[in-house]
Amino acid sequence: MEIFAQTDTLVALLTLTFLEIILGIDNIIFISIATSKLPQNQQKKASQLGLLLAMAFRIFLLMGISYLISMNAVLLHIDNSWISTDITGQSVILFGGGLFLLYKSTREIHHKVEGNEEGAAEKPKATASFSKIILQIVMIDIVFSFDSVLTAVGMTNGIDGALAIMITAVIVSMIIMMVFAAPVGKFVNTHPTIQMLALSFLILIGFMLITEAAHLAHTKIFEQQIGAIPKGYLYFAIAFSLGVEALNMKIRKPKS
């Protein structure tokens, strides 16, 4: 425990915890939207279970960090006149996760737009099975955990006690997110415009994961290297959109 008495270690722990919370917001949004299809009495249980699984996956990946890093070995090399890429285990996971987010978010947007068309007949709210929702959460937990752990490894590289710092940051950040998951989920699900924004953010994140996968695979299309999208750009866009929507909500709020 003496490593946590060092200033550099504490700074790394606080920074990484904050970063884990920021990265975990994506997870909370997805979990909130997924669990909204469950009966009211099962939503909190599914949300808490989803975050516990996310924490477990992160710790599991951190414990097997050497295997995780080794997944950058080339599995398949493709080189022709228009594309060149070195497919790795890391890129496959991120690419698959990105496609899943794009599919799920687009499907949810389509469902909500179809359900809100003028003149559409009122339909009872469909509920999904608990196990099906948990399976979806597990799938996306794996992807977000993978991305989170790679970021954590990059930040703590060369610091003494890096593994202990990363595991502590994951546990602390998940406890904080579990405390705020319910109010965040309730806010997202009770405001249709916020929910639509959240789904749009998930599409952006899915696209970002796909470009990250292409970057890890050193993909070139027509001799143009695919670069990773800086996460700062993405989170600035999300924060800006939420700020504009907050102003819209204030304007729409009836004056007493």
Image (cartoon, grey):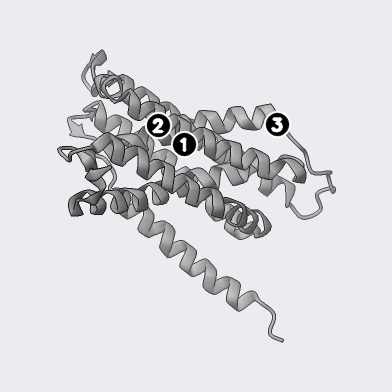
Say if mark 1 contacts mark 3, CB within 8 Å. Answer: no
Q: What residue do we see at 22% from left, 44% from top?
A: 3
Quick check: can you spot residue 34? no
Q: Earlier in the sequence, mark 2 or mark 3?
A: 2
Q: How many marks?
A: 3
In which quadrant of the rendered view does residue 63 lie?
Answer: top left
Relative placement, left or right, of 237 versus 123 is: left
What percent of the width, then of the height, locates residue 251? Answer: 60, 78
Say which of 23 and 238 sits in front.
Answer: 23
Q: Is residue 26 visible?
A: yes
Q: Which residue in the protein does label 1 denote?
A: 55
Q: Secondary structure at mark 2?
A: helix
Q: Residues within 10 Å of mark 2 (few under 14, many from 20)?
A: many
What number is the disc on residue 59?
A: 2
Image quarter in which the N terminus is found: top left
Which circle marks residue 130 in the picture? 3
Measured along the vertical axis of the image, is residue 229 above or below residue 209?
A: below
Note whether 125 is above or below 256 in the view shown: above
Please tell me whether mark 1 or mark 3 is closer to you in this view. 1
10 Å crowding of disc 3: few (<14), some (14-19), many (20+):
some
Element on which disc 3 rests: helix
Q: Residues within 10 Å of mark 1 (few under 14, many from 20)?
A: many
| Amino acid type shown at disc 1 | Met
Q: Residue furthest left?
A: 158
Question: CB under 8 Å between callouts 2 and 1?
Answer: yes
Report the residue that reaches farthest toward the bottom: 256
What type is the residue that disc 2 sits on? Answer: Ile
Q: Quadrant of residue 48?
A: top right
